[in-house]
Image (tube, grey):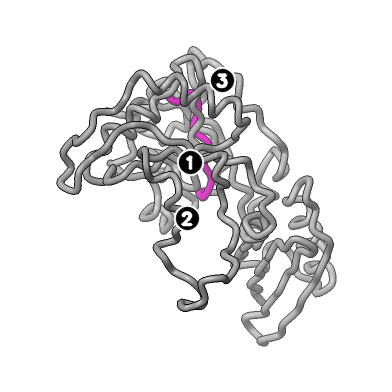
Amino acid sequence: MTWRIGVDIGGTFTDVALVDDTSGRIGVAKVPTTPHELSEGVRSALKTAMARYQVSAAEVNLLSHATTVVTNAILEQTGTRAALVTTRGFRDVLELRRSARANLYDLFQDAPSVLIPRRRRFEITERIGADGSVVTPLAETQIDELIAALEAAGVGAIAISLIFSFLNPEHERRLAARDPALPVVFVTHYPLVREPTRVLRYPLFAQWCGTIRTSDWHLRFSAAAVVYGHLHIPRVTWYDGVRFEEVSMGYPREWRRRDVPPGVPRQILPAAPEPATPAQDPRVRPRP
């Protein structure tokens, strides 16, 4: 007997649906969502469902997860305080919405609220042309003033979207350049490098993991650490002196093989130094 389990985290409840692959039997369970720590609600829902239908971890061959929490955050506008930086003269593009309206000929309809209000939309003098050429050089003297305004706005996320930057991203790269004193932590679903896939318990995952195009990002952006999931092998490895932290929860059948239970927080910053003799998996080959 094998079971497939689906979990959905909603704003009020966390739901679980189970299907017995052998008999076609279907089961459901519902528990309150735990906003302070969403994983607690997931674990509670799984325990409730598996106990109700007498499903052991070894019988679960698929655990699928989805969430409406992000959708709710957008609709309720409870996400982080965000700002937009764009080319001077294009601050109100979000309001124009490409002139799309629910009722094309109703000039008095109320438009939906924008995700970033005008007071947190900032401009800087620059312009890239439709052919990728620099029409107006980036006003370097305005950058410090822009940073001060962003800090005063108390924003937690910044979107930089300059006109035609996809043809020539040089101005965006200059604006995105960080203070070298600030640590960079990559948080990604997949590892940026390919080495971790060589020790997979499930080799099929390898085709969706690290790529050549991202293999130097931890060096290019001077990352203090890289945090990723997906591989279901919680561990710490080091590549080029940068710590890679695998934090995926994995499937219930995998938990019994681990020394640390799922959901235990790990410290990422301050970044720990690389040990003199890294405890690297012997099957991980050194980077060339």
Label 2: which secondary element: loop
How would you rate the neighbour count of disc 1 (Cα within 10 Å): few for under 14, some for 14-19, many for 20 or more?
A: many
Q: How many angstroms separate mark 3 from mark 1 (CA)? A: 30 Å
Label 3: which secondary element: loop
What's the residue type where badge 2 is placed?
A: Tyr
Q: Is residue 203 above or below residue 196?
A: below
Q: Residue 202 carries which label?
A: 2
The mark that comes first in sequence, 3 or 1, is 1
Q: Position of residue 227 (x, y in %)?
A: 53, 36
Q: Residue 84 carries which label?
A: 1
Q: Mark 3 points at which residue?
A: 271
Q: Is residue 246 shown to the viewer in this render? A: no
Is residue 54 found left or right of 99 in the rendered image?
right
Toward the viewer: 43 or 287?
43
Is residue 56 found left or right of 185 in the rendered image?
right
Q: How many angstroms separate mark 2 from mark 1 (CA)? A: 41 Å
